[in-house]
Image (cartoon, rainbow, N blue to C red):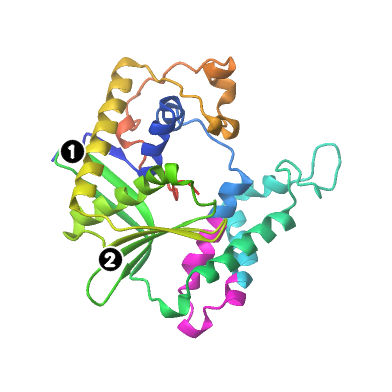
Amino acid sequence: MAVVGSLSPSRAGDFMTCPLLYRFRVIDRIPERPSPAQVRGTLVHAVLERLFDLPTEARTVQAAVDMLVPQWERLVAEEPELAELFRAAPDGGDGASGGTSGESEADWLEQARRMVERYFTLEDPRRLEPAEREVFVETVLESGLRLRGFIDRVDVAPSGDVRIVDYKTGTAPRADFEARALFQMKFYALVLWRLRGRVPRLLQLMYLGNGEILRYAPDEADLRATQRKVEALWQAIRRAMDTGEWRHRPSRLCDWCDHKVRCPEFGGTPPPLPEAPVGRPSPADAESSLREHGDL
C-alpha cells in the first residue's frame, strides 16, 4: 500500500489548533526554543519511565526524586542548548531570577520534584509491571495515511485487557475541553486496535500538575469515529498543501507561540513556502524525526 502521508497526535493537534502553526512546524520546519515547561515535562517523563527499571520494592518516592538531577544532567549532555534555559542574564546578573527563562534552575527542579511526588498519590508503582514503556507505534490505514506516535505506558492485565497511560505535567482540563484531551488517547487506541486486533479497555490521563486522573473506556464506535476524524484532518491538510492557504486561528495559546513575529494576527508575514528540492522529504514524511509526548 502506498503511504500518502503521516500524522501523529501532536501534529494533528497542531492543525486543529492553528493550520498556520502546523505549516511552520511541518512544512517550514522553523526551529522553536524549548520552554522550561516543555523540558520539565520531558524530565518528569524520563524519571517515570526509568522508575520501572528498578526492582519492585525499590520504586519509592525518594528513589524517583533522586533520579531528577541525574536525568537532568543526561538531558543537558545530550542537548547542551538546554543549559541556556537558566543562563545568567546578559546584564551581568547571576541568573538567580532565572536568566532567560524567568525562573531559577532550583525553582524549576523543585516544581519537577513536586510533580514526581504527586505521581505517587495517584498510583503505587510497586503494584504495577507495565508491559511497555515509551513504545513507538504506527499503522497504515486503508487510505494510505500512516498514524504514528509514542505511548508513555501500556499495561496489560492477566485477562489481556489493555490500558493506555499518558502522563501530563499540566493540570486537568475543564469538562468542556475533555474531548480534546482524549483525542490523543483515542488516536493511540486506534493504532493499537489496528495493530493488535483488540480495543484497549481503558485510556488513562494522569495530570501531575494537580493530581487528577481522567479515565475513558472506548469502544469500536469511538475508534471508528476517531479514524474518520483523522482522515478528514488529513484531507484538510492536503487541501492546504495544494492551495498554499494556511489559515491562522487566534486563541489564548498564541501567548505561548514562538511564531508570533511571523503571524499575520500580530502584524507579521509568513516566509515564502519552501520549495521541495530533490532529496528533501515531502510534507507527508515530515514527522519522521519528531519525538514528542504530545501536549504536556
Element carrying mark 2: strand
Is 46 magenta? The answer is yes
Q: Measured from the top left, where is residue 83 in percent x and y?
A: 67, 49
Q: Is residue 126 left or right of residue 241?
A: right
The single residue placed furthest to the front in the displayed view is: 175
- Residue under numbered circle 1: 144
Q: Residues within 10 Å of mark 2 (few under 14, many from 20)?
A: many
Query: Which amino acid type is marked by label 2?
Result: Val
Q: Which mark is residue 234?
A: none
In front here: 285 or 53? Answer: 53
Q: Measured from the top left, where is residue 71 in percent x and y?
A: 58, 63
Quadrant of the drawing holding the N terminus: top left
- Residue under numbered circle 2: 162
Q: Residues within 10 Å of mark 1 (few under 14, many from 20)?
A: some
Q: Is residue 248 left or right of residue 89?
A: left
Q: How many marks?
A: 2
Is 166 magenta? The answer is no
